[in-house]
C-alpha cells in the first residue's frame, strides 16, 4: 500500500536522479572516510571537513531532488530561507558526526557518531519539509519513528561494524539506504492537504530546482576535486611506494606491519622466507592469528605447539612500547624480534636472524663455564651454581674431591696419561651422580659435587666416590690406582657461598692430614683450628729469630752405674699470645711446610753448643724428623753443629723414628753409615709404635733402641707389654745394641726394667725436661 502510494506520488525520473546522487555521495563518503582513517593532523581534519560537506550536501540534495519529483499533480512551493537553512543543518547534523566517526578508533565511538548522523538525516528531512508552503502535512507518527530508526541503525551499523566500516561498497550502500529509506518512508507516512487561498509563489519550484542543481553541482565538483587530488596523491604515493618496496624487498630483516585491526598491511620477502611461505603468497589483510595458524598448518604443529604460538603472539600484541625479544624458532634459528607500536594503532615487527651471533656468544659463554678437558662445568660454573642456589636459599651439600697420588702419575707417565685419567675420573663421577647431579672440575686434580638432600645421602655419595675412584683405572696398557680425599660442608654450616667453599676446603685439608682416602665433614671449630694452624705456621718463621724457642733437656740414667750419662734435647716454644706450644703440635706443621729444616738445624747447633759447655762427658740426643733425614742438608747441618760447638762427635746422638727410615733400604743404610762415619751415634726412637720390624734392627746400623713410653706405662698391668719390652731387650743385647726405656714414672716400673736388664731409662721419675740456664748451667743439671 505504502509502495503503491509512493509510486503514484513520485515521478520516476527524479527518484532515480535522487538515488544516483545519494549513491555518488555515499561512494565519496566511503572514499573520504578511508582517507581520514589513514591521515593524521591537518590533513586528517581537511578530509574530515570533506566528509562533512559531501555527506551533508548529499543528504540535502537527495532530499530535494526527490521532492522535485513528488506530487507532480500539485504545485508545491518552498520557503527559500528554510530550504537553505536545512542544507546547513544537514552538514552540521549528518556530515559532522560522520566526519567524527571516520576519525574515531574505538568501534563504539564510531557506532555512536554513526547513529547520531542517522538522527541528523531525520532532522534535515523534517526541517526541509518545513520549507513546504501552501499545504498542511499530516503525519503518521509510527511511520516517522520507523523512518528515523532506519537512518540511525543503518549508519550506526555502517560505521560501527569493523567489516562494514572497512568496505567502501557497504558504506556507500548503507548510506544510500539510510538516506533513501528514511526519506521515502517518511514521505510515505505524510499526507498533504492543500490549503485553499494560500499565497503561493509559482516560481518557487524553479528556485528549488536551482538550489538542488547547485547542490548536485557542488557535490559533483567536490567529488571531482576530491578524485583529482586523490589521484595526484596516489601517483605520488605510487612513486613513493615503489622506492619503499625496493627498500623493503632488499632488507636483510623480515618486516611486517599490522594495522590497528591487527591485519597485515605491509610485509617483505624476507618475512615470507623466515616463516617458510612461498615468495608469491599474499598475506595482505590476514590477521596475525591467521598467519600463526597458517604457519602451524605448514609445519604440522600439534595443538600444544599452536597454543604456545598463540600465547606468544598475545604477548607480542600486548607490547605497548618498543621492545626487543629473542625468539628461538623450531628449527633452532634465533630471531631478534623488534616490536614497534605505531601511534595510530597497529605495530611494525621486524625479524633479524641472529643465530650466528647468538651461537658464538653461547659458545663463548659455554667455554667460560666448561672445563675443556673433561667437559665438566668448571670452577666458575660451580660458583655460579652455588650462588644461584643460595638465593633463595636451598639446602645442599658440597663435596670437594682431591685425587690422591695423581701428581706421581703425571710425573711418571706424562701429562697425556694424566689427562686420560682425569677424563675417566670425570666419567665415573658423572655416573655416580646421574644426569640430574652436578659434578665440576675445579682445576688440576680437584673436583666437586653438589648434592641436594640430607647429610646421610651426601655421606653415602662420598663413600661411593671413594670406593669407585679406588678401583684401578685402565689407560692403554697401564693399570693405575689412585684414590681420593673428600671434604664435605653443608649449607647449614656456612653463611654464604664463599664460606661454603672455604669450609669444604678445610674439611678436605683435614682428610688429607688424616691420611687421605677418606671423608671429613666440616664441623664448627675446624675453621678455628685451621686458622690457629695458619697462625702458628706464620709465627713459627720468626720464632727462632725472636728468641721464642729454646731447648729443654731430659736426663738419661744408666742403670748399672746409677748415673746420668746424657740428655735428650726437646724443643720448647713460648708463643707470645698462645703461651707454651707443644712440639707435638708445631713440629708436624713444620714438617708439612718444610720449616723443620731450619728449625732442626738450629736445634742441632743449639744442643751441641750447650752440651759442649758441660764439664762432664754426657752425650746429647737430638730428635731428627723424617723430612730432615731425607734432606741432603742433614750431613752438613751435623758437621756445622759439631764444628762450631767443638763438641766431640761421639757425644752427639740423633734419634730417628722408624717411619723416617723405612723407604729405600739401601739408600738409608748409606746415609746412616755416613752419619756414623762422622762419629755420631744413632738411636731408634719410639720403638714399637711404628712398623716395629725386627729386620730393621738387623739391617740398619743402630747404636740404641728407645722403647716407646706406651709400653712402659702399661707394663705393670699388661703382660703383653712386658713380653714386648723383655723380647726387644734380649734381641738388642744379642745384636749388641744399647736399650733405653722411655717414660719411666714410677719406682716399680724402674724396678721391672732393672730386673730384665734394661741399660738406661728416661722419664719424669728420673727428671723432667728442664731448661739449661747458661750461667749456673752444667752444674745444676749434672748434680
Ligand atoms: P719424643 O722424642 O718421644 O720425646 C719424648 C717426649 O716424652 C717429650 O715430650 C717428653 O717431655 C715426654 N716425656 C718424657 N718423660 C716422660 C714421662 O715420664 N711421662 C710422660 N708422659 N711423658 C714423658 P715433648 O717434649 O712434648 O716432645 C714431644 C715430641 O716432639 C717428641 O717425642 C719428639 O718427637 C718431638 N720433638 C721434640 N723436640 C723436637 C726437636 O727438637 N726436633 C724434632 N724433630 N722433634 C722434636
Ligand atoms: Ca725422642
Ligand atoms: Ca720417644
Image: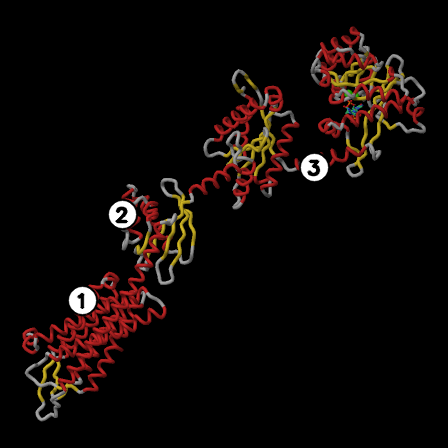
* Structural distance between the alpha carbons of marks 1 and 2: 34 Å
Q: Quadrant of the N terminus?
A: bottom left
* Structural distance between the alpha carbons of marks 3 and 1: 94 Å
Disc 3 or disc 2, which is closer to the eye? 2
Circle 1: element type: helix
Residue 507 % position (x, y): 62, 33
Q: Is residue 557 visible?
A: yes
Horizontal side of 271 relative to 684 (left or right) equals: left
Residue 575 % position (x, y): 79, 35
The residue wearing badge 1 is 173
326 and 509: which one is in front?
326
Residue 541 % position (x, y): 77, 33
Disc 3 or disc 1, which is closer to the eye? 1
The image quadrant in which ligand 3 is located: top right
Graded by Cα atoms within 10 Å as few (under 14), some (14 to 19) or many (20 or more), the crowding at tag 2 reads few
Circle 3: element type: helix
Graded by Cα atoms within 10 Å as few (under 14), some (14 to 19) or many (20 or more), the crowding at tag 3 reads few
470 and 202: which one is in front?
202
Which residue corresponds to the image point at 35% horizontal and 58% vertical from the top-left?
346
The residue wearing badge 3 is 531
218 and 720: which one is in front?
218
User: Which tag, 3 or 2, sits closer to the chain's start?
Assistant: 2
Horizontal side of 112 relative to 145 (left or right) equals: right
User: Which tag, 3 or 1, sits closer to the chain's start?
Assistant: 1
Disc 1 or disc 2, which is closer to the eye? 2
Vertical comparison of 665 with 68: above or below: above
The residue wearing badge 2 is 280
Q: Residue furthest top?
A: 734
Amino acid at each position: 500500500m505504502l509502495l503503491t502510494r509512493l509510486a503514484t506520488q513520485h515521478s520516476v525520473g527524479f527518484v532515480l536522479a535522487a538515488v544516483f546522487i545519494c549513491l555518488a555521495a555515499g561512494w565519496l563518503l566511503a572514499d573520504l572516510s578511508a582517507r581520514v582513517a589513514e591521515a593524521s593532523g591537518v590533513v586528517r581534519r581537511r578530509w574530515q571537513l570533506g566528509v562533512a560537506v559531501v555527506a551533508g550536501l548529499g543528504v540535502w540534495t537527495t532530499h530535494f531532488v526527490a521532492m522535485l519529483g513528488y506530487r507532480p499533480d500539485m504545485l508545491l512551493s518552498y520557503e527559500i530561507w528554510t530550504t537553505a537553512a536545512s542544507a546547513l543543518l544537514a552538514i552540521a547534523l549528518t556530515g559532522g558526526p560522520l566526519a567524527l566517526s571516520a576519525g574515531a578508533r574505538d568501534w563504539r565511538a564510531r557506532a555512536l557518531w554513526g547513529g547520531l548522523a542517522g538522527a541528523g538525516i531525520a532532522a534535515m528531512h523534517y526541517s526541509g519539509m518545513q520549507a513546504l508552503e501552501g499545504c498542511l502535512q499530516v503525519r503518521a507518527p509510527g511511520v516517522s519513528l520507523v523512518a528515523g530508526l532506519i537512518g540511525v541503525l543503518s549508519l550506526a551499523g555502517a560505521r560501527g561494524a569493523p567489516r562494514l566500516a572497512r568496505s567502501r561498497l557497504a558504506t556507500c550502500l548503507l548510506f544510500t539506504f539510510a538516506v533513501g529509506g528514511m526519506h521515502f518512508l517518511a514521505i510515505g507516512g505524510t499526507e498533504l492537504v492543500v490549503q485553499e487561498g494560500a499565497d503561493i509563489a509559482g516560481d518557487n519550484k524553479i528556485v528549488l530546482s536551482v538550489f538542488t542543481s547547485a547542490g548536485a553541482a557542488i557535490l559533483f565538483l567536490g567529488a571531482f576535486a576530491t578524485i583529482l587530488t586523490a589521484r595526484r596523491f596516489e601517483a605520488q604515493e605510487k612513486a613513493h611506494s615503489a622506492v619503499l618496496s625496493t627498500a623493503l624487498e632488499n632488507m636483510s630483516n623480515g618486516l611486517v606491519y599490522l594495522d590497528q585491526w591487527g591485519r597485515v598491511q605491509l610485509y617483505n620477502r624476507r618475512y615470507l622466507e623466515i616463516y617458510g611461505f612461498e615468495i608469491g603468497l599474499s598475506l595482505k589483510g590476514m590477521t596475525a592469528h591467521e598467519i600463526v595458524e597458517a604457519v602451524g598448518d605448514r609445519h604440522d604443529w600439534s595443538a600444544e605447539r599452536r597454543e604456545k604460538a598463540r600465547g606468544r603472539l598475545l604477548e607480542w600484541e600486548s607490547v605497548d612500547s618498543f621492545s626487543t625479544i629473542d625468539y628461538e624458532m623450531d628449527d633452532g634459528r634465533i630471531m631478534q624480534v623488534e616490536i614497534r607500536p605505531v601511534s595510530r594503532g597497529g605495530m611494525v615487527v621486524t625479524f633479524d636472524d641472529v643465530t650466528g651471533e647468538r651461537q658464538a656468544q653461547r659458545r663463548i659463554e659455554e667455554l667460560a663455564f666448561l672445563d675443556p678437558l673433561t667437559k665438566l662445568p668448571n670452577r666458575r660454573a660451580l660458583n655460579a651454581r652455588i650462588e644461584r642456589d643460595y638465593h633463595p636459599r636451598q639446602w645442599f651439600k658440597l663435596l670437594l674431591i682431591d685425587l690422591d697420588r695423581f701428581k706421581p702419575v703425571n710425573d711418571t707417565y706424562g701429562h697425556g696419561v694424566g689427562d686420560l685419567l682425569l677424563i675417566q675420573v670425570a666419567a665415573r663421577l658423572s655416573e655416580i651422580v646421574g644426569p640430574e647431579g652436578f659434578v665440576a672440575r675445579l682445576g688440576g686434580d680437584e673436583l666437586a659435587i653438589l648434592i641436594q638432600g640430607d647429610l646421610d645421602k651426601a655421606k653415602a655419595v662420598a663413600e661411593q666416590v671413594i670406593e669407585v675412584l679406588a678401583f684401578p683405572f685402565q689407560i692403554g696398557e697401564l693399570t693405575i690406582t689412585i684414590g681420593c680425599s673428600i671434604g664435605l660442608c653443608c649449607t647449614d654450616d656456612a653463611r654464604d657461598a664463599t664460606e661454603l667453599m672455604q669450609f669444604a676446603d678445610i674439611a678436605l685439608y683435614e682428610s688429607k692430614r688424616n691420611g687421605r682416602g677418606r671423608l671429613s665433614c666440616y664441623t664448627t671449630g675446624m675453621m678455628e683450628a685451621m686458622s690457629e694452624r695458619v697462625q702458628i705456621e706464620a709465627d713459627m718463621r720468626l720464632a727462632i729469630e725472636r728468641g721464642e724457642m729454646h731447648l729443654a733437656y731430659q736426663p738419661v740414667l744408666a742403670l748399672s752405674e746409677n748415673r746420668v750419662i746424657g740428655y735428650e734435647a726437646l724443643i720448647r716454644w713460648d708463643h707470645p699470645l698462645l703461651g707454651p706450644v707443644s712440639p707435638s703440635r708445631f713440629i708436624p706443621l713444620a714438617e708439612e711446610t718444610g720449616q723443620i729444616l731450619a728449625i732442626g738445624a738450629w736445634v742441632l747447633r743449639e744442643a751441641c753448643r750447650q752440651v759442649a759447655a758441660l764439664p762432664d762427658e754426657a752425650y746429647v740426643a737430638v730428635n731428627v724428623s723424617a723430612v730432615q733425614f731425607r734432606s741432603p742438608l742433614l750431613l752438613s747441618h751435623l758437621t756445622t753443629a759439631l764444628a762450631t760447638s767443638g763438641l766431640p762427635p761421639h757425644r752427639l746422638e740423633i734419634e730417628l723414628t722408624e717411619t723416617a727410615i723405612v723407604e729405600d733400604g739401601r739408600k738409608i743404610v748409606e746415609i746412616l753409615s755416613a752419619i756414623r762415619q762422622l762419629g755420631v751415634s744413632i738411636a731408634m726412637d719410639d720403638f714399637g709404635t711404628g712398623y716395629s720390624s725386627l729386620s730393621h734392627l738387623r739391617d740398619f746400623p743402630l747404636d740404641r733402641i728407645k722403647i716407646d713410653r706406651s709400653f712402659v706405662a702399661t707394663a705393670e698391668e699388661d703382660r703383653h707389654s712386658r713380653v714386648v719390652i723383655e723380647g726387644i731387650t734380649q734381641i738388642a743385647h744379642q745384636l749388641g745394641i744399647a736399650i733405653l726405656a722411655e717414660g719411666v714414672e714410677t719406682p716399680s716400673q724402674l724396678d721391672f726394667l732393672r730386673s730384665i736388664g734394661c741399660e738406661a731409662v728416661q722419664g719424669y721419675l728420673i727428671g723432667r725436661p728442664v731448661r739449661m740456664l747458661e750461667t749456673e748451667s752444667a752444674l745444676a743439671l749434672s748434680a
